[in-house]
Structure formats: C-alpha cells, structure tokens
Amino acid sequence: MSPPLTDARSAALYAEALKVLPGGVNSPVRAMRAIGRDPLFVERGEGAEIVDADGNRYIDYVCSWGPLIHGHAHPEVVAAISAAAARGTSFGAPTAGEVELAEEVAARFPSVEMVRMTSSGTEASMSALRLARAATGREKVLKFAGAYHGHVDGLLAEAGSGLATQGIPASPGVPAAATAATVIVPWNDPQALRAAVAEHGDRLAAIVAEPYPANMGVVLPREGFLALLREQADASGALLILDEVISGFRVARGGAQAREQIRPDLTIMGKVLGGGLPAAAYAGPRALMEQIAPAGDVYQAGTLSGNPLAVAAGLATLRLLDGDAYDRLEATTTALAAGLRDGAAAAGRTVEVVDVPGLLTVFFREGPVRDYADAAASDRDAHAAWCRALLAHGVYPPPSQFEAWFPSLAHDDAVVRRTLDAAAAAFQETAP
Ligand SMILES: Cc1ncc(COP(=O)(O)O)c(C=O)c1O
Ligand SMILES: N[C@H](C=O)CCC(=O)O
C-alpha cells in the first residue's frame, strides 16, 4: 500500500473553498480539524474506495456518514437513479415510488404503519418532536448527553458529532427558550433517567434516543436500558422516539428496535433510506401519523420531500438488503473489530473497540465506554495521530473520536485485510 503521493490539488481546492464556504466545507465534521489536518477533496467513489482530487486511493470508512451500505456507485443504485432522472427530477406531486418506499419501510418496522418523508434527518427529528408535542399537549423533551439528532435548535445541547468534536456545549444562535424545554440525562444511567422523569414526567412530550448512539462514537446501551426508556415513557405518558437515522436498515433489517425488541412510538430514519441521496423520514402508527397535515393539523411540508431520485435510490438500496447482506455486514464488522483489537495489542496500545453490525469505534482509552463522559475521556491526540497515519496508509477513517466507522457490503475480505495491515502499521508508528 503506497502512501499518498501528494495532496497539492486538495490543498489548492481547500484554499479556494475557504474563500467561499465557511470553514471550507458544507458540514463541519468533513473539515478534519479534530485530527489536525486539512480535508481531502473527493473526486469519485468506487465500491469500498474513494479517489481524491490528487488521484490517491483510500479504503473509505465514512461512506458518506452511513448512507452507502452497498459502497460507492453500486451499479443497481446508479441505474435506478439514472432511470428516475430521465423521467424528471422533481414534480412536487405524489409519485408511485413514495408509496412503494413507505410500504418497504412498514414491512421492515413493525412499529410503523405510516411514513412522512423529509429531505434530511434534522428535518425528520424536528418534525417528530412537533408531532410528539402536539399529540401529548406537552413541551419538554428528554435527550441523552452525547446524542445527536441533527441541528434542531432544542436538541443542540450537550450534543454529539461535530459539537462534541469542537467542544461546543450549545450553539450560539439557539434561543434560550428553545433549550429550556430540553432535559438532558447521561446515557446508560438508570437512576438519572428515573430522577429526570420523576421531576419532569408530567410535562414530557417525548424521550428521544439513538438506540445505538453513534455520535459520541458507538456507545451501546447497557442491558435493560432501552426497556427502561420504554417503561419510563409509558409511566409518564411521554412518547418514545427512537432516532434510527444511523442504525435503521444498517444494524438489522428492522434497525436497532428489531435487534433489541423495543417498540417506539415514533422512529426517525435517514441515511440508508435515501441510498446516498437526500431522504429521511419520521414514521409510526396511523393514529399518531394521521395528525400530520393534510390528514391532521400538525403542519410539516417540504418542496423536495419524497424526491423521485432519492426514492429510487432508497428503493434500490433497500431491495438489495437481503438476509445474506446483513450476515455479511456483521461478519465484516466483527472481523474488523477483532483485527483492530489485535493490531492495537500487538503494538502495545490500549484501545476499546466497540462494535455492532455495520458500526464500530476505536476509543483510545482503557475500560468500557458507557456514556459521553467516558468517550470524552479518550486520548484524542492519540486517536488523531492514528487517523493521520491511517490516511497515509490509504485508509480514510471518520476523522473524529466522536463518530462511527461505516463498513459497507463492498468491504470484502481483501479490503478488510488491507485495512487491518494499515491499522496495525499505524498503531506501531504512532505508539508513544
Ligand atoms: C442519529 C442522527 N440523527 C439525526 C441526524 C441528522 O441527519 P441529517 O444530517 O440528515 O440532518 C444524524 C446525522 O447527521 C444522526 O446521526
Ligand atoms: N455524525 C454526523 C451524522 O451522523 C456526521 C454527518 C454530518 O453531520 O456531516
């Protein structure tokens, strides 16, 4: 595996970008600031790999931050998008594909009877909260520290992802009133959850959670914690909203709720649902969903919602995900996680690798990672150095300790072997 020859073209593009895009990017985590380097500009993707503007090839573990479960430019997904584009890119009127996609979603999620599509996970989160507030007549929302549900004003408090990366506890520009109704509880802390529900329960519209949090790195729920969310929501009359934007269609056909046997009132979806094009959704039982306009009076709309290209990409993506695909993705993730543990141990490095099918994080710390405080206590400098070394060896990791790796079905055994060779070398080279 040869290291990148040059990044001159990426550097030039970044210099230009800084003049016209804030921070040179259109979403903060792409800037690679958390690992102390400048971003690479991507020219194209092929299966498990991306090629940058200088012609360097990388095995990609960002995969557009999750949507590309089949890897880059899967021929069937590309064909579906091309065929849809040839029929017209947007109509602002219903299309058959939207009905088919909603049926595909409902077939996978027993908690879902109806689906409302949006263009981003942020919109879906915002709209699910509006529906929960309307349905309960209450205002407060309980979220978990280190969880990220998009840049919804009220949820930009102790949020993960780019806010964690940049140490932004709450974004300027969010009105105090927007977060006044937000109750924040540490993840995996039953006592804190019970105490918060005891204090705010009669005003709680919703408990919202990523069932497999992946925006503080992957931090899995402790045994019984998700069941406790359901119990506490029921006890207080709040709705349970599971944000499966990352986990949905990835960790299992029916998402984390299927693996964990927990039935939410509403589910937020995105990423894989749009197959690499902008699509997301919130979904749930008819009685709740029919409160949304025009069936009901909870207003929510979108010029490009249910866009035919995104729907075509989503349908093609979901239809390729048979049982064998999930078995393969699980085997790939397990092999990666085990190999990363071995590579670290061989180099005398202490890391905690957390994995669930389709997602993993290498935390540079000793001991289990139970919550955001544990994740934040990782050695971020060591993580950054390892990521820079991985890039030099042709592997493109999520450039932050507070994100997940997204292996895809295009990451075959040979790709995994090359990744683990690079990772082992990077562990050795960056050992203190
Ligand atoms: C769990 C979760 N929810 C919501 C979002 C927001 O989605 P989007 O970036 O499409 O707005 C994201 C990612 O960005 C996410 O990871
Ligand atoms: N962690 C974020 C979503 O999952 C990363 C994507 C982004 O915000 O650009």
Image: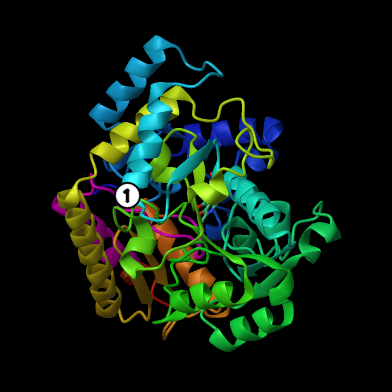
Using the image, determine if residue 249 lies above or below residue 74: below
Residue 229 in percent (x, y) is at 52, 74
Q: In this figure, which residue is indicated by the disc labeled 1?
A: 108
Using the image, determine if residue 40 lies above or below residue 420: above
Give the amino acid type for the residue marked by disc 1 in the picture: Arg
Specify whether tag 1 is near ligand 1 (CB below 8 Å). Answer: no
Residue at image position (35%, 79%) is 349
Q: From where the camera sits, is residue 376 visible?
A: no
Residue 215 in percent (x, y) is at 51, 61
Residue at image position (37%, 62%) is 256
Is residue 305 one of those drawn in magenta? Answer: no
Question: Is 272 placed left or right of 143 in the picture?
Answer: left
Q: Secondary structure at mark 1?
A: helix
Question: Is 209 placed left or right of 431 in the picture?
Answer: right
Farthest residue toward the bottom?
191
Question: Is 279 placed left or right of 24 in the picture?
Answer: left
What residue span does the magenta drawing correspond to?
398-426
Q: From where the camera sits, is residue 102 visible?
A: yes
Residue 355 in percent (x, y) is at 33, 68
Q: Quadrant of residue 343?
A: bottom left
Residue 209 in percent (x, y) is at 54, 65
Residue at image position (48%, 80%) is 370
User: Relative to the observer, which residue lies in front, 156 or 53?
Assistant: 156
Residue at image position (58%, 79%) is 373
Q: Quadrant of residue 211?
A: bottom left
Q: Quadrant of residue 198?
A: bottom right
